[in-house]
Amino acid sequence: MSLQIFYICTGAWKENAYIIIKNKESILIDPGDNFSELDTYFKTFNTNYKAIINTHGHFDHVGAVEEFRRKYSIPFYIHSKDKRLVHQANLFRKLTGVSGTNPTPTIDFFLDNLISIELSDTNIKIHHVPGHSEGSVVFEVENNLIIGDLFFNDSIGRNDLPGGNLKKLMESISYVLDNFKNFMIYPGHGTPFLLNEAKIDRLKNICNEYNN
């Protein structure tokens, strides 16, 4: 069975929660909010969940993590430099005016101790790309890249949120643009897109505007 990637938007910030499926095994990425809705959607694929892995720890990406972790007894992975963001997710949720709270996720493993995570007969490679947050990562699987909030279809990620750094963000974006041409890009918000030459040039121009 070939690799499959599906997503659904969650929460007030329209964050993309992903499921990657290979041979009836799956990994959840960035389950951000609305656990019941996500659970109903992901169950339609009838797969065995192996883990939850996150691109970063901002509140809109971690809101449903703990409920999935508890219900399905699966481990949660995130970069250690975003540990504080995970623990303060409900505080930042409140500060941005989003009502309600979610269970604070328990972190089982840190992604910075790993090169990749196995999914059936393929590997999900991990690349540390700080800038949107200190612990931001992207996940490479076959010819696909799940990038969180590093950049989007026609804009780049914010650096003014907790853990953000403009210089590091620019370096991380350049790394992806230089190394993943013609990959399918799955961002944390908005629609997926192909990182073709025209898109790379457009994103480089946007970065240049920030640097000038």
Image: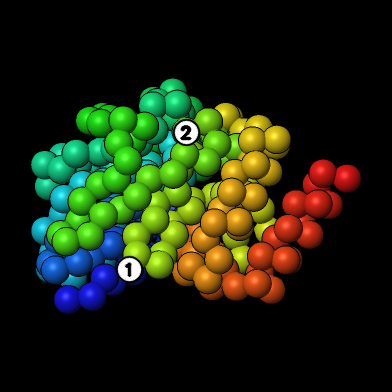
For the point 69% across and 73% down, the residue is 198
Q: Which residue is mark 1?
A: 5
Split into 4 quadrants, where in the image is the C terminus? top right
**Residue 131 lies in quadrant:** top right
Residue at the farthest bottom position: 1
Element under label 2?
loop
Residue 100 picture location, percent across and down: 41, 39
Disc on the earlier residue, 2 or 1: 1
Taking the image as shown, residue 180 lies to the left or right of residue 17, namely right
Type of residue at label 2?
A: Gly
Residue 119 picture location, percent across and down: 20, 56
For the point 22% across and 60% down, the residue is 122
- Could you say which is closer to the camera, residue 199 or residue 100? 199
Taking the image as shown, residue 169 lies to the left or right of residue 107, namely right
**Is there any visible trace of residue 96 in the rendered image?**
no
Residue 40 picture location, percent across and down: 22, 64
Residue at the farthest right position: 212
Q: Which residue is mark 2?
A: 135
For the point 72% across and 66% down, the residue is 201
Question: Pointer 2: residues within 10 angstroms few (<14), some, or many (20+)?
Answer: many
Residue 168 sits above or below residue 14 on the image: above
